[in-house]
Each structure stands twice: as structure tokens, then as C-alpha cells.
Image: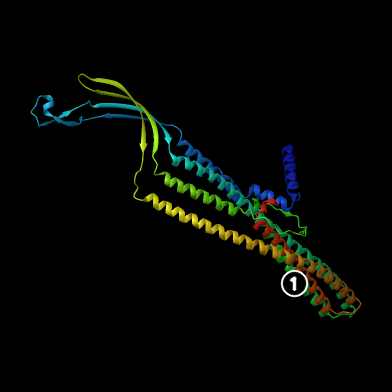
Amino acid sequence: MKTKILLLTALLLATVLLQAQPSKVLRLEDCLNLALEQNANVRNAQTGIQIPEQQQAAIRAGLLPQVNVSGNYQYYLEVPRQMIPASAFGGPEGQFTAAQFGVPLNLNTSLQATQVLYSKSLLLALRQADTGKEIARLQLRSAQEDVVYNVSAAFYNAQTLAKQIAFLEGNLASLEKVTQTTRLLAEQQLATPVSVQRLQLQQENLHNQVQNLSDSYTQTLHLLQLLMGIPQTEEIRIDTAIRVPGSVELAVAPAQRTELQLLDKQKGINLLEQQRISAEALPTVAAFGSYSYAGFGKFGDNSLLKFYPSSAVGISLQWNLFDGLGRRAKRAQKDLEFRQLENRQAFLRENIDMERANAWNNIISGQRALEASESSVQLAEKVLDQTSLQLREGLANITDLLNAENALREAQTNYLSALIKLRSAQLEMDKATGHLLDQ
């Protein structure tokens, strides 16, 4: 009994220790790899690749021999009659009589094989299935690009929130020191109690901002978990160190957007469908062969049951010579759809050019704003330090300190805004030029 208790205790301790281990710090590359592997939309697109493969296999089956076996048992309660000329049995000319041919019992088993010799529609359908496989691969790439974009945006947002929290916590630490100093001065009647209260109020405001940002940070991490396919019950940590983006060169080559390639493939599918509609006017030729074994018999007096084989080979032809102008209407419909695809493609190219131009302008302005805001933060920090020193020496008042602290927070906010703008612009540029998966 003691041994079991010891084993259970050891197992419980091991479980607690495993749970207490800090989770791995995830970099952006780690998040992207997990998302590309586990995201539900990506997995669904990967499954979608198999659908056109099975469609192609089904079409290819129509070009292979088709073998059918059938059987039939039939017993006539009354053998059918047929009208025959009475003269065939010595009766008068011009008169008919009803006669029963055959026996009540009929058994039949047959084997039939057919092989399509020529069907342009099936051949074109096979080519369509090939194009469908390429479309499925492009749809997978599109799903991967969406995941990369969304994960990158969420990751950048989480890093920015973490940086904002770090800024505010640093400001809180500095403000706490000033508050303690001011409280001591107030005890010695060298500062007013109102000054201490104003500092405490500022601290409370900063605490509330930190709490709100922490809530937003937690929600952003939950979004990352959803995109990466990680259960919400688990906890993740990300690398919060922000790397300032370097310089970016404007891409001159035409954008290789997946959406453009998808439209190209859809146009190809449309042209194949038009060819298939035209091919419906051509004949379908098939060879066939059949073998059957039939039995005939009856019960009662002079009962009998005899079997007789039969076989045949031949060629069949199916040719729709006139379909009421249905094919013409179908071709006209596909031609209109083709024009729609061309219009969508032209608009998409113009939209891509606009996205590239906007992203490039945002990159340039973001780089300028980031450089300016970095200098502003350094200057605001220096002013706050000097004001804190002057406050202790009695050369500045609380209003001066609070103004300096507000100026620092404004400079930090401007810095983060410029950083967000630059990183978002570079992400938009990767999207516009079709390089999201090249990260």
C-alpha cells in the first residue's frame, strides 16, 4: 500500500513539475511554421488537393473497359400470345389467330463488356481535371498566404502591446520613486499633500492603462493560438523583442500574386469547357461484346429445362445531330463568363499596382517617422530625468514633472505608431508582390 502511495505521489510531483516548466518562447518564424502545419484552413486546403485527383481517376475510369453482369428469372403465369396469319397454319388468307410461343419458365444470365474507342468529351474532361489539380494547389498557397499575413499581423500587434506595457511599467517605476521623494518632502512640509495626490492619481491612471493593454495582449495571444491551431487551454509566450525593420527596395518585377494565377487557371478551365460543349456535337464510338446463357422450361407433364448460349460483338455509335441550339446557348454563356474573368483580372492588376504604390509610400513615410520619433523619445527621457532632479532640488514643481511625463508617453506612443506603420507597410508590400511565403 505504501509503495502505491509513493508511486502516486511521485507521479503527481512529476506532473506538477512538467506543468510548472515555462513554455517555449515563440519567435515569428516558429509561429508561422506552426500555423502552416496546424491551421484548420490550411489543412482543409491540403485535403482539397485530393478532390481533383479522385475526379481525374473517375474520369479516367470512363476510358477503361466497362464490364456488366446481369441475370433474370421469369415465370409466366400465362404465356403471352402473338397474332400470326392464319394462312401460316393452313387457314384462310387475310385472317389472324392468337398463338402462344415459348414456355412459362425463362432463365437468363449475360455478360457484357464495352470499351470507348473515341470520345473527345472524356479526353477534354481529363484535361480539365489536370487544371483542377493546379487550381487546388494554388488555393492551398492562397490559404497559406492568408495564414502568414494574419499570423504576422497578430504577432506584430502582440509585440507592440508588450512594448507599450514595458514603456508604461518603466514610467510607473520612475513615477513611484518621485512619489516617494515627494511624500518625504511633504512630511517635512517642503511639498504640499496635493502634489502627492496628483502623483498618486497619475500612477492609478498608468496602472489602468497597463491593465487594459495586458487584457488586449492576452486576447491577441489567444488569436495567435487560434491561427496556429493551438488549444486555448494551453499557454504560449512570444519573443517580445522588436526588431526594427531595415531598408526595403521597391520591387520592379511584376507581382506574382496567387489570385492572378488562379484567374489564369479559371480562364483555362473556361476554354476547356467551351471545347467540351463543342465536342458534344461529335459522335462517341464504342466497341462491345456480350455473352449470354438462357434457359427455357416448364413444369408439370413433360417438364423440361434446356439452356442455350448466345454471343455477339459489335460497334456502337452515339451522335446527337441536333440539340435544339442548346450547345450554342451554353457556348455563349461560357464566353460571357470568360469576359468576366478577363475584367476581374484587369481590375486585380490595377489594384495590385495601387497596393504596391501605397505600401511603398507608407514604408518611406514610416521610416522617416520612426527616425524622428526615436530622437523624440530620447529627448523626452532626458527632459524627464532633468525635471525629476530639479523637483528634488526645488527648482521645478509637480506640474512640470507631470508635463514632462506626459510628453515622454506621447513620444513613446508616436514611436510605436511609426513602428507599427512601418512593419504593416512592409507586410502589405509582401502581400502586394506575392512574397508572403518568402519570409
Q: Find numbered disc 1 in the image and state the secondary structure of the residue it sits on.
A: helix
Q: Which residue is drawn at 74% across and 43% down?
A: 9
Residue 125: x percent and y percent? 47, 43
Crowding at dot 1, Cα within 10 Å, few <14 / some 14-19 / many 20+, comes out as few
Residue 18: x percent and y percent? 74, 46
The residue nearer to you, when weighing 291 against 272, is 272
Q: Which residue in the structure is indicated by mark 1?
A: 205
State the colouring used for the structure image: rainbow
Question: Is residue 264 visible to us here?
Answer: yes
Left or right of residue 120, residue 172 in this image: right
Up/down of 197 relative to 144, above or below: below
The residue nearer to you, when weighing 316 against 306, is 316
Left or right of residue 87, residue 172 in this image: right
The number of numbered badges drawn on the structure is 1
Residue 299, located in which quarter of the rendered image? Answer: top left
Residue 390: x percent and y percent? 89, 76
Q: Which residue is drawn at 28% across and 20% down?
A: 306
Up/down of 144 relative to 93, above or below: below
Left or right of residue 53, residue 39 in this image: right
The residue nearer to you, when weighing 44 against 200, is 44
Determine the residue located farthest toward the left in the rendered image: 92
Residue 266: x percent and y percent? 53, 51
Determine the residue located farthest toward the top in the rendered image: 302
Tag 1: amino acid: Asn
Q: Which residue is drawn at 32% across and 30% down?
A: 72
Up/down of 220 relative to 106, above or below: below
